[in-house]
Image (spheres, helix red, strand yellow):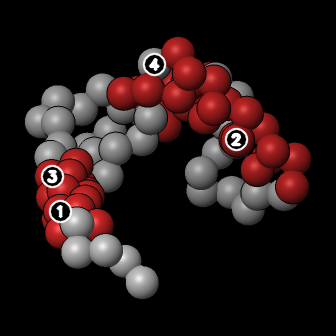
């Protein structure tokens, strides 16, 4: 059984966690640094309109991890016009 001193701390921790989750998910950058499909293909990704096989997915994972490590804002952005 938890002591009376621990219960408020658990409640406080839950509120803080929810607060940070809500704020971190709601903020988006106005600037779009994502690359064009041609730039992704030049880096090694297969054509997005073709059917991919296992090797294409494996290469895509490597390319996207490389982009994430070097230029994380260059990853594809939701609702990008590029």
In-front residue for pair 12/73: 12
Q: CA distance from mark 4 to mark 2?
A: 16 Å
Say which of marks 1 and 4 sits in front.
Answer: 1
Secondary structure type for disc 4: loop
Disc nearer the start of the sequence (4/2)? 2
Q: Are marks 3 and 4 in contact (CB under 8 Å)?
A: no
Answer above or below: position of 9 versus 35: below
For the residue carrying disc 3, how many other residues have a C-alpha within 10 Å: few (<14), some (14-19), or many (20+)?
Answer: few
Kindly identify which residue carries mark 3: 23
User: Spatial distance from mark 3 to mark 4, Cα to Cα?
Assistant: 23 Å
In this rendering, the label closer to the viewer, 4 or 2: 4
Q: Earlier in the sequence, mark 3 or mark 4?
A: 3
Tell me the number on the disc at residue 71: 4
Which quadrant does the C terminus fall into? top left
* Residue depicted at x 17% and y 62%: 12
Please identify the residue farthest to the bottom as the structure is shown.
1
| Front one among 19 and 1 | 1
Badge 2: residue crowd in 10 Å (few <14, some 14–19, many ≥20): some
Residue at 18 percent across and 69 percent down: it is 8
Residue 32 in view (yes/no): yes
Q: Nearer the viewer, mark 3 or mark 1?
A: 1
* x and y, in percent, of residue 55 in the image: 87, 47
Q: Label 1, on which residue?
A: 12
Of marks 1 and 2, which one's residue comes earlier in the chain? 1
Whether residue 35 is visible here, answered yes or no, is no
Q: Secondary structure under badge 1?
A: helix
């Amino acid at each position: 059984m938890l002591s009376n001193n621990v219960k408020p701390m658990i409640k406080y921790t839950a509120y803080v966690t929810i607060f940070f989750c809500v704020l971190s998910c709601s903020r988006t950058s106005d600037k779009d640094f994502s690359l064009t499909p041609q730039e992704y293909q030049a880096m090694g990704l297969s054509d997005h309109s073709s059917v991919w096989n296992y090797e294409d997915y494996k290469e895509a994972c490597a390319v996207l991890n490389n982009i994430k490590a070097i230029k994380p804002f260059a990853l594809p952005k939701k609702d990008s016009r590029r």
